[in-house]
């Protein structure tokens, strides 16, 4: 008998609502910060769909396996560089703040450091816009319309769909591991991945990463001889 220390419901209702709310905010909020004293319409508002929304909704918008694989590949391709640029932006911003604190400021040094901040920020935005464009180019007009429709109800349909999908995949992994055990195979690597990777990701409210791990386990169970 295989037992994973997984909760009955992989993601709590409260956690899932927070996740969906954040995804919808990211998806349809402004891409660029505006002057707070004079709010301006974002020319790109509603034009793009971040990977979080597209991947979470892949069942409801009927993404093909090829579309989903390509979108995930695009995300993985840009993720490490995005993290590097965010860290660089934080460092350059901290350095700018340090130069601005003294009673007397070195104007040339301050402006030079500001350029470093803006360069990092510009490269990060270029990276993100490139990713959003690549994702949009994978979608059909019908899929784009469905994504916008999902946002209208606050994400309640998406919330329940994701919960059911993850629960179903957890059960499929359990069933596959039990078949391994019944046939004399050692399912300990499967159980370890569930306990050490999938469960912590679900507990942390990271369904995208958790689902990617579940999909890898399902492919492993399917590919290995029965």
Image (cartoon, rainbow, N blue to C red):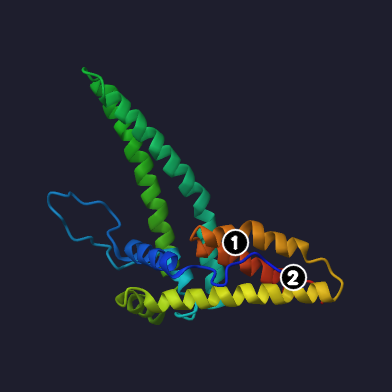
Locate residue 70, reporting x and y percent. Answer: 54, 67
Instruction: Give left or right: position of 53 versus 38.
Output: right
Residue 2's label in the rendered image is 2
Give the quarter of the figure containing the C terminus: bottom right
Task: State the residue position of label 1.
Answer: 199
Residue found at x 23% / y 62%: 43
Instruction: Give left or right: position of 133 versus 42.
Output: right
Residue found at x 71% / y 64%: 191
Against 94, residue 123 (above or below) is: below
Examine the rendering and report whether any part of residue 29 can be seen. Answer: yes
Residue 16's label in the rendered image is none
Mark 1 residue element: helix
Of all residues shown, which one is farthest toward the top? 104
Q: Are marks 2 and 1 in contact (CB under 8 Å)?
A: no
Of all residues shown, which one is farthest toward the left? 38
Locate residue 8, reporting x and y percent. Answer: 57, 72
Residue found at x 30% / y 33%: 114
Residue found at x 50% / y 74%: 163
Against 183, residue 40 (above or below) is: above
Instruction: Give left or right: position of 17 versus 226.
Output: left
Locate residue 81, reporting x and y percent. Answer: 49, 47
Q: CA distance from mark 2 to mark 1?
A: 15 Å
Examine the rendering and report whether any part of residue 225 can be seen. Answer: no
Disc 2 crowd rating (10 Å Cα; few below 14, some 14-19, many 20+) is: some
Give the quarter of the figure containing the N terminus: bottom right
Q: Which quarter of the figure has residue 115?
A: top left
Against 197, residue 121 (above or below) is: above
């Amino acid at each position: 008998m295989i037992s994973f220390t997984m909760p009955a419901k992989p993601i709590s209702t409260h956690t899932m609502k927070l996740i969906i709310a954040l995804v919808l905010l990211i998806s349809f909020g402004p891409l660029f910060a505006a002057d707070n004293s004079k709010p301006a319409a974002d020319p790109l508002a509603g034009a793009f769909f971040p990977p979080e929304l597209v991947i979470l909704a892949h069942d409801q918008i009927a993404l093909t396996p090829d579309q989903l694989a390509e979108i995930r590949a695009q995300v993985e391709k840009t993720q490490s560089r995005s993290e590097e640029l965010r860290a660089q932006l934080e460092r350059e911003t901290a350095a700018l703040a340090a130069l601005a604190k003294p009673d007397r400021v070195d104007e040339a040094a301050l402006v030079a450091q500001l350029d470093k901040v803006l360069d990092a920020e510009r490269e990060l935005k270029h990276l993100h816009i490139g990713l959003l464009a690549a994702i949009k180019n994978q979608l059909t007009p019908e899929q784009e319309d469905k994504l916008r429709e999902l946002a209208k109800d606050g994400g309640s349909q998406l919330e329940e769909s994701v919960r059911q999908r993850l629960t179903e995949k957890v059960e499929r992994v359990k069933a596959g591991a039990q078949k391994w055990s019944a046939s004399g195979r050692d399912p300990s690597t499967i159980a370890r991945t569930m306990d050490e990777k999938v469960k912590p990701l679900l507990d942390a409210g990271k369904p995208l990463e958790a689902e990617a791990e579940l999909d890898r386990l399902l492919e492993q169970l399917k590919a290995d001889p029965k």
